[in-house]
Image (tube, rainbow, N blue to C red):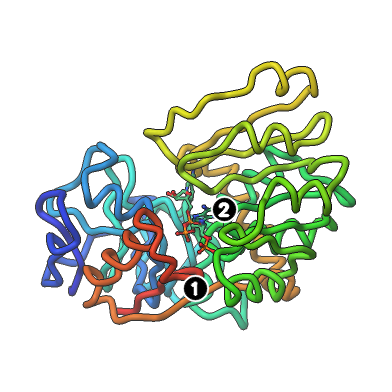
Amino acid sequence: MKAAFIKQTGPPENIIWGELPAPQPGPTHCLVKVGAVALNPVDTYIRGGMIQMPLPSPYVVGCDLAGTVVEVGPAVTQFQPGDRVWGSNQGLLGRQGTFAEFCAVDECWLYPTPQGVSDEEAAAIALVGITAHLGLVRDAQLQKGETILIQGGSGGVGSIVVQMAKATGARVIATAGSDKKAELCRQLGADFVIRYQTQNLEAELKKTAPAGVNVWWETLREPNFDLAVSSLAARGRMIVMAGREARPPFPVGPFYVKGCSLHGFLMFMATPEEQRDCAEDINRWLVEGTLKANIDRVMPLSQAAAAHRLQEESTIGKSGALSGKIVLKP
Ligand SMILES: NC(=O)c1ccc[n+]([C@@H]2O[C@H](COP(=O)([O-])OP(=O)(O)OC[C@H]3O[C@@H](n4cnc5c(N)ncnc54)[C@H](OP(=O)(O)O)[C@@H]3O)[C@@H](O)[C@H]2O)c1
């Protein structure tokens, strides 16, 4: 099969587009013919060696996938050949990745793709959808009528948090770096958009949420805790999920006297059961039309190296080139 893989970690150019033997499904695995994959910042960190974890050799890059089951192991109970599926959490903790024509995936990481949802959409919502759900539902427990601030409302994670928060009945404030991205945030359901480059976030928040925000969703890799904590309402919750190297100052006093809480998590450390709960809601919202994938562009899988370069420049280099997900097709 054709696959995008590395033999050693390093720059995007280390990704080889070449032939590898197709994987053999184990007892609890489904062999999936890949229809589409999506790229996440974590893919670039693993490929670049910024996150150290055991990697098979050669290592097929990528976490997300959607496609069709073509073969199942003898112990598989939930799927059969012909079923359309999506999933994430591959390419991590020693598992082989998804950027290939075929993937062998344990059925615990797969979910049925609803009718009417394309492989491109399902792949694009996989990791970011599960991340948004874990943070909003399990951790922040966002309630109808509450106010949430989402940093980077048009980004891969942010664009899904905006939609899920809106579906919960919250009042949604998002930040954006350009007019185009501000418009996208509004289309996704944001009630207010603050242009972080040209407006003063603190002052705008005081106007739009004078009593403070109930939830602050941080997607930045260097959170400004002074700003976030001063903008939180009493018993406010803050989500942090990026910036492994970040060591910003933290305003302990203002934080605890308001009874706030801070929640950090890594989606890929959530259990299969936790992730399945997320996937069930995601599927329901996709069918109802309350949730849509936010795809910036679709590229051939053979261009995986160029896609990695673009993602890295956008997320780490802050080039602003992307407004959502890069989807690739074999
Ligand atoms: N912990 C986990 O499980 C988990 C899961 C998924 C992702 N992550 C991490 O979360 C981060 C975001 O992921 P992603 O996929 O959403 O990345 P992304 O698509 O590149 O989005 C980054 C967002 O940051 C915004 N941004 C950049 N500079 C900003 C600033 N100064 N103020 C406000 N917003 C700013 C961008 O907004 P503009 O484009 O409008 O400038 C963009 O919306 C990454 O570091 C990723 O590794 C962690």
- Which residue is located at x 50 percent, y 69 percent? 324
Residue 31 is tagged as none
Q: Quick one: quadrant of the N terminus?
A: bottom left
User: 247 or 310, which lies in front?
Assistant: 247
- Which residue is located at x 42 percent, y 33 percent? 246
| Mark 2 Cβ inside 8 Å of ligand 1 | no
User: 40 or 118, which lies in front?
Assistant: 40
Q: Assign a secondary structure to mark 2.
A: helix
| Type of the residue with mark 1 | Asp
Q: Position of residue 256 (x, y in %)?
A: 73, 18
Q: Quadrant of residue 291?
A: bottom right
- Would you name the residue on which mark 2 appears? 130
Residue 83 is tagged as 1
| Type of the residue with mark 2 | Ile
- Which residue is located at x 22 percent, y 77 percent? 302
| Mark 1 Cβ inside 8 Å of ligand 1 | no
- 172 in relation to 307, above or below: above
Task: Report whether 20 appears left or right of 181.
Answer: left
